[in-house]
Amino acid sequence: MSKHMSLLADLKTMVETKKVAGSGILTLENYIDRMQILQNMVHCADLSNPAKPLDLYRQWTNRVMEELFQQGDKERELGIEISPICDRNTATIEKSQISFIDYIVHPLWETWSDLVYPDAQTILETLEDNREWYYNQINENNNEENDE
């Protein structure tokens, strides 16, 4: 998590520097800037599932959540404290994805989108649509529970 925050801070600095320069053009004249861009590009790719088309995103979410739930099952079996979002009895996929998007993925993609505007705008919009889909799932589940 600290690496994520460090990369995001560096990326935000690059965006602000680009804005202050006034040209709106990203220049990668020195090695450090090029390395920061490449590191953030890989980081964006690593956190890209929520920005993919919904059907693909949901497939990956289910795989990742099942892996986390299996970890929680093992922790329960060993009698140790169950890690956050790993307890299949209490964690919800929808809420975990909304938190993941709100606190980790969206700030990164929003900053990246600012840096390469307008080239990543579609990715950012897909991310926001996917977040809205999960939010709507929570509301639908709540409505179904109230109907019972």
Image (cartoon, grey):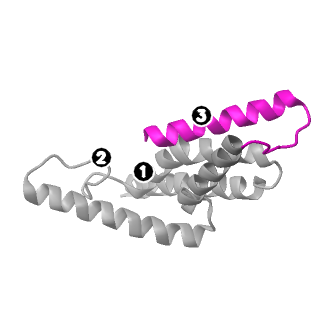
SS class, disc 3: helix
Q: Position of residue 137 (x, y in %)?
A: 50, 57
Residue depicted at 83% across the width and 27% down the height? 20
Which residue occupies the foreground of this view, 47 or 137?
Answer: 47
In this view, 102 is above or below 88: above
In this view, 42 is above or below 103: below
Q: Which mark is residue 84?
A: 2
Tags 2 and 1 touching, CB below 8 Å: no
Which residue occupies the foreground of this view, 69 or 145?
Answer: 69
Tags 3 and 2 touching, CB below 8 Å: no
The residue sitting at the top extreme is 20
Which residue occupies the foreground of this view, 95 or 81?
Answer: 81
Task: Give the magenta range.
Answer: 1-30
Tags 1 and 3 touching, CB below 8 Å: no
Q: Amino acid at mark 1?
A: Ser
Q: Earlier in the sequence, mark 3 or mark 2?
A: 3
Q: CA distance from mark 2 to mark 1?
A: 10 Å
The tally of labels here is 3
Q: Amino acid at mark 3?
A: Ala
Q: Which residue is mark 3?
A: 9
SS class, disc 2: loop
The verdict on residue 12 being magenta is: yes
| Between marks 1 and 3 in the image, the one whose residue lies nearer the viewer | 3
Would you say 131 lies left or right of 112 here? Answer: left
Q: Quadrant of the C terminus?
A: bottom left
Residue depicted at 78% across the width and 49% down the height? 116
Q: Earlier in the sequence, mark 2 or mark 1?
A: 2
Q: Which residue is mark 1?
A: 96
Q: Amino acid at mark 2?
A: Pro
